[in-house]
Image: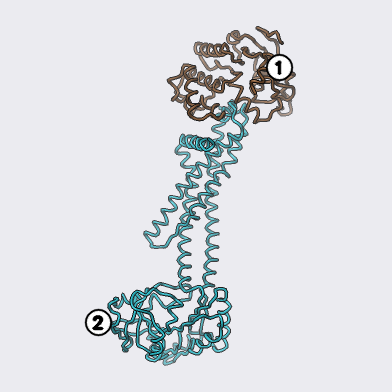
Chain colours: A cyan, B brown
Amino acid sequence: MRQTRITRNIWLGIENLLLHKLRSFLTMLGVVFGVGSVVAMLSVGEGASKEALEQIRKLGSNNIIISSVKSAEEEQTSTQHSHMSIYGLTYEDHHRITESFHDIQQTAPVKLMRKDSRLHERAMELRVVGTTPEWFKLVPREVIAGRVLLPSDEVKQAPVALLTEFGARKILATEHTIGQTISIGGDQFEIVGIVKSESGQAGNIQIPDQQVDVYIPIEVARLYFGDIFTKRTSGGDEREMVELHQVIVQVDDPKKVESVAAGIDRMLEQFHKKKDYVVSVPLALLKQAEATKRTFNIVLGSIAGISLLVGGIGIMNIMLASVTERTREIGIRRAIGAKRKQIIYQFLIETVVLSTMGGIIGLGIGVLIPLLITYFSGMITVITLQGILLPLLISMTIGILFGLYPAVRAANVDPIVALRHE
Amino acid sequence: MSEKALSNNHGEIVRLENAQKIYQMGTEQVRALAGVNVSFNKGSFWAIMGPSGSGKSTMMNILGCLDRLTSGSYFLDGQDVSQLDDDSLSDFRLRYLGFIFQSFNLIPQLTVQRNIELPLYYLGWDASQSAAHAKELAGQVGLGDRVGHRPTELSGGQMQRVAIARALANDPHVIFADEPTGNLDSTTGEQILELLINLNKLGKTIIIVTHEPAIAERAQNRLYMIDGKIDRIEGVRDETN
């Protein structure tokens, strides 16, 4: 009974609104666009931050990444002819880091270089990553075919190579290529596996992956290619000596990541005269990204709030006009015996129906826009349940909030005066 | 409640005791009702007459529970309603009273049926019951074939019939009619008056405000007002007064 009465009242409200279709529609527009823009903005924002967070997460939340960088003064002198820059992390650094901290679970040194490579008739420059089997535990990758590097490769100094899916595709390797020989920098390597490639780039941390085309054991890399690299630049050849380009460290507890990172930084400081390394913590970046996301949400929320406020004021404006226009009707209802609260109820239902319908239409638009954005620009957009329910809830609240004053005005109309109202 | 009230009174439905209504108009006080003592019997037909400003509209508003006395008492069906709050007065109007106005006061957006259903809606009847009752009432006032029409599609006489049907929907004890024939031609006015007289014969108490002596002549009792006071009362007086 109670239920049917409410639905009946809502129907009466809808009927009344349908008597003025155009006006009701125009009144709704404010909420339609308010809710539409909120839903659309939230999903675009959510998508953008999800992408960023996803990338950082791929770097591993327990990981610390120490990268070699050319220091500022080195950058200047290196432009001089036939100068050789010596910088970056050393094998000794890697050893010291591994030995000095209890909380470190495992580490992986990384050597990066570009080498001309050839598979059958296909020749191209590949990026070569010299690393240890631990690398694949620190940054887990799905094995598509074959196997990853093994400790025995290290011990035997076996010339084996592992391609990423991306690199494999570029050099026209398939799973049938496993076991075949690839020439890297003039040396012969046996292809033992292909792993799935995943993009991973966040801020200044770059993880060798997407553009990385081939993994080989670090001992082999050192043995075959040494530590001196020649870069061809417009000003002539540039020579660098870098032992290790990166060291990836995994800490056993995420809570200790930042303190261990600080410890590594302090330790390296003692052995490096110049600041030729950077210690990055994906977790810290993650936290930072999350904080940015919060700020972003607050900004979006404010914009949304303002647009919904404007929508609400629009509704209030029209409802006040409607109250004046329907003064006589109110007088009639009161004379017949309607109580004040029943008049309030009647008008409130109309505004809530208006704002909720506006909210639903706005939701439709707000869901459609991100889909179109994704379709046309490929940008990731995420529509969350929260992103849908919140604007709906707010639009209903707006209906109540901004409907209340006109409704109370209506209820306070003096029936005697109202009945004489023309 | 009405059963008890019926058994307790002595045929009296309305009684004003030293009723005063004072309006503040700027700095001036207007005594719209200046100490009125009167009682109407159940089933009677009264016409309230008087020049404009005599207080007859105020009298109607007070008796119709649309307004409250400044001082004095008003007993409706044996209950003192002069001190009731807005909600309770609304409830009295809903359960005991029916109104007919000079300008019909139908809600133009609603159909004839919906207009008649209005009191039933506030009484909490369910939709199908009230629809049936409204159609029956429309038939009684001769508009059985017009229930789906809107007031604007009807003639003045028809509109007033709808208003009468609406006033009857809650089976009221008293029907107030404020210049019910004022906007109608004499033939139609006569028909409406006949309808009211018939309702009175069926036992409804009818109180009509009019300035037309010809209309007032048809009432059993006439009350003439001047300056917020009763000037004279004509017609069949009840022996209990």
Q: Residue A263, image x and y in percent? A: 58, 82
Given contact means CB atoms under 8 Å apart, are the residues at marks 2 and 1 in contact?
no
Q: Quadrant of the C terminus of chain B?
A: top right
Structural distance between the alpha carbons of marks 2 and 1: 119 Å
Q: Residue B146, image x and y in percent? A: 44, 21
Whether A195 is drawn above or below A8: the answer is: below
Q: Please give left or right for residue B201 compared with residue A247 in the image.
A: right
Q: Residue B128, image x and y in percent? A: 48, 28
Mark 2 belongs to chain: A
Question: On residue A368, which mark appears?
Answer: none
Q: Amino acid at mark 1?
A: Asp
Whether B178 is drawn above or below A383: the answer is: above
SS at badge 1:
loop
Residue A266 location, quadrant? bottom right
Q: Residues within 10 Å of mark 2 (few under 14, many from 20)?
A: few
Whether A65 is drawn above or below A80: the answer is: above
Q: Which residue is mark 2?
A: A121
SS at badge 2:
loop
Q: Which residue is mark 1?
A: B227
Mark 1 belongs to chain: B
